[in-house]
Amino acid sequence: MTYLVFGPDAAQKETKIAELKKKHLAEREALSFDYDVFDGRKMDPQILRQALLALPVFSPKRFILVRESHKLSEHNRKVIMDFLASGRQDHLVFVLEAEGFKGRDSFFAALKTHAQLIEAALPRAANVFDVTRAMSRHQPSQALKILHGLLSDGQHPLQLLGGLIWFWKEQKRVLSKDVFEDGLRAFQETDLNIKRSRLYPDYALEVLIVRLCRMMSSKTRAARTV
């Protein structure tokens, strides 16, 4: 089996590589006899070729890890592609780690036909639309959890309120007229509470989200009257 573990999140990559090692190198002795690590920046093609062909001693399969495979020389890339094209990998777990590949990298394109891809992308920063998605799923507690994270990260309450207003307008087509208008009044109250300091802004948004979720979960999917 061949794996390409790539992406900018180094911690996530190391976790996945550790999981693969634990799975395939169960015996302690295997780490000495059936495990090789290479640096893609400075690797002798002949030594790489020999390692790829060597048979396991203690484990069912050898384990070879090539770090920074995006920096492999053309010679080493050819050694790897020739080996993968041969179809003789039953004795081996072959893991290539990479930060990423630039543009239309032909080596990366070829690897995708032979390897299982494991992408370690950096987590996307949350935004107000994650709050509204949780509201759409009728998960007020999750919506509030995301809200708290956004506020802790310094997002302004009135900016978040704008995103919630956009969401509510999108709900007009699926809400009854009365419910939709009740929601608009709730937004007006929240806006006044924030601007006139009647409530702490964080608490005002929490109250609004809970109110809107209740409106959406009770008789909110009825066709709106004309």
Image (tube, rainbow, N blue to C red):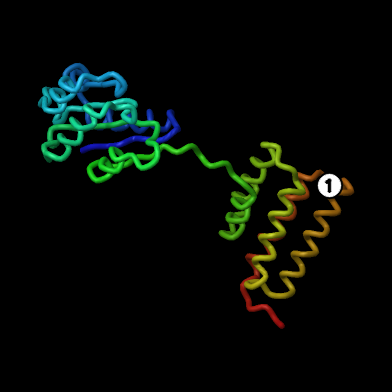
Q: Residue furthest right?
A: 196
Residue 123 vertical position relative to residue 66 in the rendered view, above or below: below
How many numbered callouts?
Answer: 1
Q: Position of residue 126 (x, y in %)?
A: 59, 44
Q: Is residue 153 left or right of residue 27?
A: right
Q: What is the three-letter code of the residue carrying label 1?
A: Leu
Q: Is residue 18 visible?
A: no
Circle 1: element type: loop
> Camera-side residue: 62 or 136?
62
Q: Which quadrant holds the N terminus?
A: top left
Q: Which quadrant holds the C terminus?
A: bottom right
Residue 211 vertical position relative to residue 113 in the rendered view, above or below: below
Q: Quadrant of residue 167?
A: bottom right
- Name the residue: 18% across, 30% down: 79
For disc 1, the marked residue is 199
- Name the residue: 25% across, 20% down: 43
> Camera-side residue: 12 or 71?
71
Q: Position of residue 84 (x, y in %)?
A: 17, 37
Residue 101 vertical position relative to residue 191 in the rendered view, above or below: above
Q: Quadrant of residue 100?
A: top left
